Amino acid sequence: MTDLTEFRVDAKAWLEKNCPPSQRKPVVKEEQIWSGRQQAFYCDDAKLWFERCRDKGYTVPDWPKEYGGAGMSPLEAKALKEEMNALGCRPPLYDLGIWMLGPALLEFGNDEQRREHLPKIARGEIRWCQGYSEPGAGSDLASLQCKAEDKGDHFLVNGAKIWTTWADKADWIFCLVRTDHGAAKQEGISFLLIDMDNPGVNVSPIALISGESEFCQTFFDNVEVPKKNLVAELNQGWSVAKGLLKHERKLMSEIGGDVPSPGINPVQAATQYLPMKDGKITNSHLRAQLVEHEMTMRAVGLTHFRSFEERISGNANKNIPLIMKYIGTEEMKNKAELMLACLGTQGLGWEGDEYTEDEIMVTRGWLFSKTMSIAGGTNEVQLNIIAKQALGLPD
């Protein structure tokens, strides 16, 4: 028995023993367990599952043990995730600190910042949000104008950020600010960590067509930020930002594996809602679209596996996350369109007893899917980046 095989056996045994049955089914948004000072659990089993994973280091299994992780190798962390998926285990914890800031601090943060922030992320004590986009700096992020003035022992931050996901529920924000207005766009930006409880931080939710308000606009009015909260060197924040975006694009390229979704997939929806004859969907056009979607999803999965193998062997292709972010988000939109087409008039439900919970989730998921090709950089800009960086085409 190889070491990895033995690890899988042990991991599976631990999961079967410690993951409550109620935590082995698809998660709905209302039952996600988020980090934060206001952390809440919808049931005792969810709290128990989180605490067991936290104590084992499974909220961030591939982080070093000194920061609250399990110290796993990439192969072991991948195997653990596969065993959790096979058993249907819900993610024990959700947070941008886990997916984005934590990996950035491991790469760019100093010892003090890692010791201060990483264990709190691993234990689910602090909820983070991302302060990148501004009303006048979205796709052209380097044009940002939110400024931080050097005041000796602290920075004084003034400006605004927009599309700040869950800012109204977050405890801290990792933020790009301009610290040198005379430098070239990318060269005058710094990366700050800001406590949302600081005087002068105000948040305003933005209503979305999906009926939710997870995006916010965040305002900074003479907010004092200690110098110790500067990540990397002054005016070197663009390098941190690009490093962090790699993790965001990787997350998005995986097509929402941890995102709440209806209990049915496109093929199940088609067989449940569309006319059938001799075991076939009679609508040949939709049938062909479903086949193409299934093939694309299979290809995406194989590409992710190949990319992972290359990464752990030291031959990572830096262009894969760029390409897969585009393909992943486009296919998420395509999947939502297919689901809506399969449901017909039952895909028009917003509320009411005449629609099932799955049908309502399909409708709202279709609306939400439109945001995926904007978040993390618009897909139009992403194509420009792919053309230049991956294909070597001229500007």
Image (cartoon, rainbow, N blue to C red):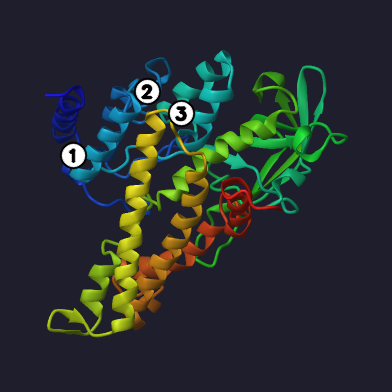
Which quadrant of the view contains residue 312? Answer: top left
| Residue at horizontal 14 percent and vertical 35 percent from the top | 16
Which quadrant of the view contains residue 90? Answer: top left
Residue type marked 2:
Gly
Percent x, y for residue 318? 51, 39
Which quadrant of the view contains residue 195? Answer: top right
Comparing 346 with 294, the one in front is 294
Residue 223 disc label: none
Q: Return the residue at label 1.
A: 20
Residue 121 disc label: 3
- Which of marks 1 and 3 precedes in the sequence? 1
CA–CA distance in space, label 3 to label 2: 10 Å
Percent x, y for residue 172? 58, 34
Quarter holding the N terminus is top left
Q: Return the residue at label 2.
A: 69
Label 2 element class: loop
